[in-house]
Image (spheres, helix red, strand yellow):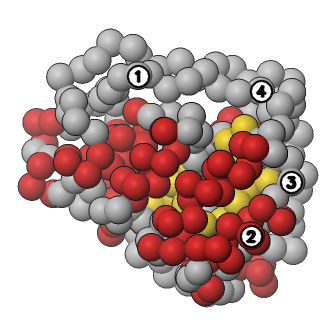
Amino acid sequence: MAVLAGMVLSLSVQAMVPAATAAPSARPTVPLPAPTTAGAATVGPATVSPATVSPVPPVTSPPPPTAVDCTKVKCVALTFDDGPVKNTSHVLDALSARGARATFFVLGIMARKRPGLLRRMIAEGNAVGDHSWNHPLMFGSKATKIRSQFVRTQQVITAATGERPMLVRPPFGQQDKKVRKTLAKLGSPVILWNVDPEDWKVRKADVVIRRVLKATKRNSIVLLHDVWPSTRAAVPAIIDKLQAKGFVLVTVPELLGGSPTPGKVYLHG
Ligand SMILES: [Zn+2]
């Protein structure tokens, strides 16, 4: 689904200036009467009734780690698009077992079926972003359609987690003035990437691992897709090898630090 992404990377990209310090994003530590078994066990529309959706995000233990200051350590942000699927839980397992975090840019049509996975992402310190409702082309779309694509997904994420997603990644990375203006009004920065192993195309774990390791630099944002088995299979080794090279795997908000600017495009930290 990222086939057009390369075409738009040169558009109006501004370097971001990270804040001197990233404020720790402490979350409530008092467990709520929410799911105590995170992940796949809670997946599925039948497992979540309106009564379980709390305005406060359900928090499972352990609480997520304190935010990292990427002006001081060697950070990288892995991002996963187009899910979640049931086996996104395997990606979460790999991250949590290694003390790593990532950012999931979810589709509304997928997220509405798996609110338990969204809650688990947040509870384990990951970030959840908005990747539109059903992945339409942005170029040529009316502003009202663009807006509704993101608002609908925001509503699903907010209902599941109690947190309104700040970050947006447009489908195919397509962003122009109209898209940026629309997202600026929604308060959302536009998160693209500067490492793309084309995992959706190659579908081979060893190739994905090699390409990510070769291209990743300090403060990179890496584009991956958790919907592909080959990508999920690559994740443990990607994390291990990046950590062996001294990288700290953080969320996009941690990577950017401070308050990213709505409507502004970020390719990296
Ligand atoms: Zn996508």
Q: Is residue 177 left or right of residue 217?
A: left
Q: Is residue 51 visible?
A: yes
The residue labelled by disc 2 is 210
Q: Which residue in the rendered view is the most extreme toward the top?
A: 30
Q: Position of residue 88 (x, y in %)?
A: 39, 59
* Mark 1 and mark 2: Cα distance apart in space: 32 Å
Instruction: Give the label, 4 or 1, closer to the camera.
Output: 1
Query: Are dots 4 and 3 in contact, CB under 8 Å?
Result: no
* Nearest to N terminus: mark 3 or mark 1: 1
Query: Are dots 3 and 1 in contact, CB under 8 Å?
Result: no
Numbered disc 1: secondary structure: loop
* Mark 2 and mark 3: Cα distance apart in space: 14 Å
* Nearest to N terminus: mark 4 or mark 3: 4
The residue labelled by disc 1 is 62
The residue type indicated by label 1 comes to Pro
* Mark 4 and mark 3: Cα distance apart in space: 16 Å
The residue type indicated by label 4 comes to Asp
* Nearest to N terminus: mark 2 or mark 3: 2
